[in-house]
Amino acid sequence: MKIWEDDNQKYIKAMMEKNTTEQNEKLTKRLEEIDFSVLEHIERKETVNERGVFAPLDAVEVSEIEARGAEFKELGLKAIREGKVGAVLLAGGQGTRLGLDRPKGTLNIGVAKELYLFEQLLRNLMDVTDEAGVYVPLYIMTSNINNADTTAFFEEHDYFGYPKDYVKFFVQEMVPACDYEGRIYMESQTEVAMSPNGNGGWFSSMVNAGLLSDIKERGIEWINVFAVDNCLQRIADPMFVGATIAYGCESGAKVVRKAAPDERVGVLCTEDGKPSIAEYYEMTEEMSTARKENGDLKYGFGVILNYLFSEKKLEQIADARMPIHVVEKKIPYMDVDGTFVKPEQPNGYKFETLVLDMVHMMDDCIPYEVVREREFAPIKNLHGVDSLDSARELMKGCGIEL
Ligand code: UTP
């Protein structure tokens, strides 16, 4: 059955009843192009994360990093200088919690002066490239929704002083969004409400965009992937790269020590012997409060969306299917009576793959501890927890002039 023949699909039906023949031709053509199989995941949403057996995974803690700092740094800088390290900025999200109508990276995080989130991230990267004396190729993932605005912003600001040749944009794929009953939302009379398909497909999107040849030509062996919203993010951090190499691992994840046993962060551990991330809601009380002999939490380190992956391994898993997460979000849509609705609260589902699921596809992963106050200031909301306000405080604490 075609999706527009399904009586349950009230938004599509309503538009079709209102549309002219021409508009309907356009709409049906569009509907035929879209893969609606993601809807099947609604029924399976409770089981998407059926998990194996979790066990703790020891982190490379700050004390060890300090003791072996010179060795890690030298190894990391060497890899960077040899052009073996690339970075991927995940900027395809819609930042619905922040409620901006433009890319999150264009947010002005300054107070007395203008300082854009993208600008701060580029500065953080340039701390490393200044020290290494070479540039690190930076790939930026956008979506159809924000690609034009993002690229224009970089042009307008002259790439914040980073050489343009080292920056490449690629666009991630989109999937339809629906209400809680699985009814596809419409964005207009002829367009389906589509949303970016999560941050887990970044490598396959890079491949689809033809960037694998660029990666290979440049001889990149390690890719550091990170989120747009952490303004204290250290990018292509030589110590992190060096530690991952020194440990002989094919991936690494930056982690912070949990503030409390019940802190709502995903914890890096093992699952059936392979590295994995246990979400806070998947942890039993027993797991989250279990302690080692020295009193530290056994599951004591949370991920901050900063990972290092071996490029070779990424190629091997590029075609692997990733779990699809059904997430509740605010989805603007055209109602059956033709009014456009911008919801204040989540009103339906988006379908996303997540980069954290890639960790479980690795044979090993080192949890690399960083100091939260130095490296973790995510901006998810305007105020409150993980917000612009809290990030500004943290930035000031790091001596960054705002
Ligand atoms: P979040 O999970 O915080 O999602 O993204 P979001 O879309 O930015 O924000 P909300 O939940 O709607 O408020 C974490 C990182 O992953 C990127 C984001 O840009 C951010 O850097 N991301 C997320 C993508 O690149 N693509 C996506 O489809 C989703």
Image (cartoon, grey):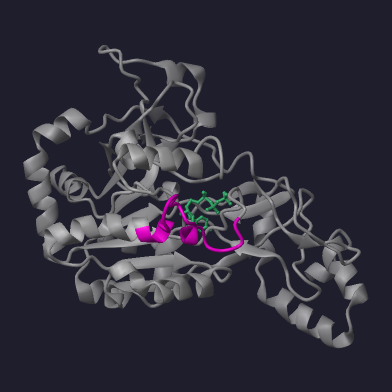
Residue bounds of the magenta highlight: 100-119
Displayed quadrant of residue 364: top left
| Residue 341, image x, y percentages | 79, 58
- As drawn, is 402 to the left or to the right of 34? left
Vertical position of residue 57 compared to residue 304: above or below: above
Residue at image position (52%, 62%) is: 103
| Residue 221, image x, y percentages | 21, 62
Q: How many marks?
A: 0
Q: Is residue 205 visible?
A: yes
Q: Nearer the viewer, residue 102 or 347?
A: 102
- As drawn, is 120 to the left or to the right of 281? left
| Residue 223, image x, y percentages | 28, 59
Displayed quadrant of residue 289: top left
Residue at image position (30%, 76%) is: 164
Is residue 271 rendered magenta in the image? no
Vertical position of residue 317 compared to residue 254: above or below: below
- As drawn, is 188 to the left or to the right of 125? right
Is residue 105 rendered magenta in the image? yes
Residue at image position (76%, 48%) is: 180
| Residue 298, image x, y percentages | 34, 21
